[in-house]
Image (cartoon, rainbow, N blue to C red):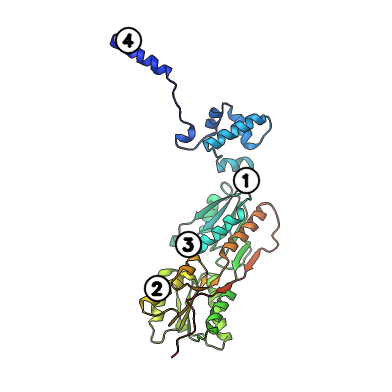
Amino acid sequence: MTLDSTREAVGARARRVPQVVPSPSLRGGRVTMQQVAAEAGVSISTVSKVINGRYGVSGETIDHVNRVIERLGYEASLVARSLRNRRTNVIGVLVMDFEPFSTEVLKGVADAIHGSGYELIAYSAGGHVEAREGWERRSLSRLMGSLVDGAVLVTPTVVDVQSDGPVVAVDPHTGPAGLPSVAGDNLQGARLGVEHLLSLGHTRIGMITGRTDLMSAQQREQGYCEALLAAGLPVDRSLMRSGGFEPELAREAARDLLSRAEPPTAVFAANDLSALATLEVARELGLDVPGRLSLVGFDNIPESALADPPLTTVHQPMRRMGEEATTMLLGLIAGEAVETPQRVLATSVVVRASSAPPPVT
């Protein structure tokens, strides 16, 4: 057999061996409508009719195409879907950054959309300092209309946003405004936290405050002052330090406060992250908690219960806030009127091991 005849025989055998072609979903990349049509052996228009629920396709063909769609993992583009029917059936949760508060709110949003037929996109502005002001407008312009039907803004800096769909705010910086919103009762919560320390016998109570530009932080400071004044005690500004809701800033504030010649016997922190930072500093300085120093935080993030000792804190229903905001948003998307556009949810004290009566002198 010559070399040429050998090549011809091999080529013939190769032509007789069936070629295994991987399904589109195994090749990598996004599955297209054209690939679904080819795999199902139908036209692209038939696949389109099945996806959009149009007439003119038999039940048997619909079942067959849907099985192929499921097997290949085909998903219509959100943008294409919105262009077809002006709806994406997706809502967005927009946050400045993912931290304990926004994460808990996000869980509540997920609770609310369960079984609703809506999907969820969580979008972060990235937490950059230069993006703190106006991040909501930038984020909404990217998502609203083409990707989401409505959005929940978590702790937005501005509430006078213009968008192509409904928006609900959770804990807005400036407090209630024209935008529908849900917030916790920060003022009453702070009062309750300080009143708990007063009931234990503390009279020298310090505070690690939050961000001065946030209404929630301002209300917590106001609640601290009101509780002291109601108990007949003066507000001693020398016992207050700014922690900015940031652990590093709170550590510096706590170290300065607890290193005083006459430190407070108790500290009320504007959020749990600041309280946990104060707990670390107290340990570094050799101050027993709660033997020498009692601590109360605010928020009741999951980490507060895991601290050593577990942190007494003001419970803010963060998860419920996300759930109620989303329920309100879904109603707005459906064209329903909102009976209570500004909702304030109750707060309460969760007593744990970080608070006790002051040391006997």
Q: Position of residue 57 (x, y in %)?
A: 66, 30
Q: Position of residue 350 (x, y in %)?
A: 55, 73
**Three-letter code for the amino acid on which mark 1 is drawn:** Arg
Q: Between marks 2 and 3, how big is the CA–CA gap?
A: 19 Å
Q: Between marks 3 and 4, how big is the CA–CA gap?
A: 72 Å
Q: Could you classify mark 4 by the number of other residues whose Cα lies within 10 Å: few (under 14), some (14-19), or many (20 or more)? A: few
* Res 171 visible: no
- Circles 4 and 1, Cβ within 8 Å, touching? The answer is no
Answer with left or right where residue 83 lies relative to residue 335: left
Quarter of the image containing the N terminus?
A: top left
Q: Nearer the viewer, residue 286 or 31?
A: 286
Q: Which residue is mark 1?
A: 87
| Residue lying at 48% horizontally and 31% vertically, measured from the top left | 23
Q: Which residue is mark 4?
A: 5
Of the numbered discs in the image, which one, if any, rests on residue 280? 2
Residue 164 drawn above or below residue 28: below
Of the numbered discs in the image, which one, if any, rests on residue 356? none
Residue 187 drawn above or below residue 31: below
Q: Nearer the viewer, mark 3 or mark 1?
A: 3
Q: Position of residue 338 (x, y in %)?
A: 69, 60
Sequence-wise, the earlier of marks 3 and 1 is 1
Could you tell me which secondary element the residue under label 2 belongs to?
helix
Sequence-wise, the earlier of marks 1 and 2 is 1
Quarter of the image containing the C terminus?
A: bottom left
Quarter residue 69 falls in: top right
Residue 270 drawn above or below residue 1: below
Q: Nearer the viewer, residue 282 or 119?
A: 282
Q: Position of residue 267 (x, y in %)?
A: 47, 79
**Three-letter code for the amino acid on which mark 2 is drawn:** Glu
